[in-house]
Image: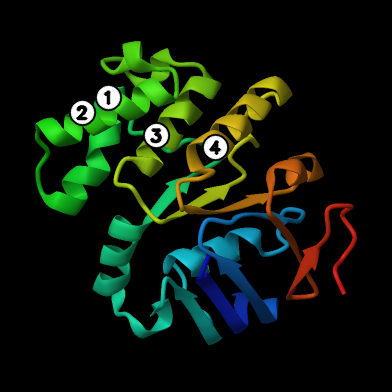
Amino acid sequence: MSDFIEIRDVHRSFREGEQTHAVLRGADATLREGELAILLGRSGSGKSTLLNLLSGIDLPDSGSVRVDGTALEELDDRGRTLFRRSCIGFVFQFFNLIPTLTVEENLLLPLELLRGSVGGRERRRAADLLGSVGLADRAGSYPDRLSGGQQQRVAIARALVHEPRLLLADEPTGNLDVDTGREVLELLDRLVRGTGRTLVMATHSRSMMGIADRVFSIEEGLLVEHGADGAASS
């Protein structure tokens, strides 16, 4: 496996009224292609900030974020948008499905944005993914007719429909009960593991460490890697 994500001396601060709050203070990390990484930390620790930097939604104050050899800070707004559409999939805590679109239409939307139109091949891809997440019979349903767990399954399928190389998940089980959350994690693991995709998942729960190849936390603005026992690596 080759290096796929490179985070080098990344600093990011935000102004809060009269004060400046430093979230990242020289963060460094490297992930290889195909790895599943967990980013642990309480709310406000910087997990979402780091995911935003990995997607190019946000830019570092200094330092570099490279994904598959592309330095995101060197792209303009349009370049970062096109990079996200083609290379990155998102799974959010609150699903972010469009309520006026059916399940199938929600899945096809990223392909329409990427390719301008959809045809039989794209519809077959959407149908196959719905089958993979156990919702083949709900293509014509609207999101409000689905349970929370079903909506998150649709969101996972939507994040994968354009076959991205990087999947980012921000607290994907935070809005689900324990049993449903476990099912969603197992589904993510099954759909990503062995495909060559890289997954970075932000969470506050250490119970998710068991599915990860790598575990990080953000401590005093730095990325700290942890071993299987949860202890920080030297």
Hey, which residue is sitting farthest front in the picture? Answer: 1
Left or right: where 60 falls relative to 141:
right
Which structural element holds mark 1?
helix
Which structural element holds mark 4?
helix
- Residue underneath mark 1: 127
The amino acid marked with disc number 2 is: Arg
Which numbered tag is attached to residue 157? 3
- Residue underneath mark 4: 188
Residue drawn where x is 43% and y is 34% of the image: 155
Q: Which of marks 1 and 3 is nearer the N terminus?
A: 1
Decide which of 17, 199 is in the foreground and name it.
199
| CB-based contact (under 8 Å), mark 1 and mark 2 | yes
Q: Are there few (<14), some (14-19), or many (20+) residues within 10 Å of tag 1? A: many
| Image spot of residue 180 (x, y percent) | 64, 22
Residue drawn where x is 72% and y is 53% of the image: 43
Separation (CA) of disc 4 from disc 1: 18 Å
The amino acid marked with disc number 3 is: Ala
Which structural element holds mark 3?
helix
| Image spot of residue 158 (x, y percent) | 36, 37
| CB-based contact (under 8 Å), mark 4 and mark 2 | no
The answer to whether residue 12 is seen in the rendering is: yes
Q: Which of marks 3 and 2 is nearer the N terminus?
A: 2
Which numbered tag is attached to residue 94? none
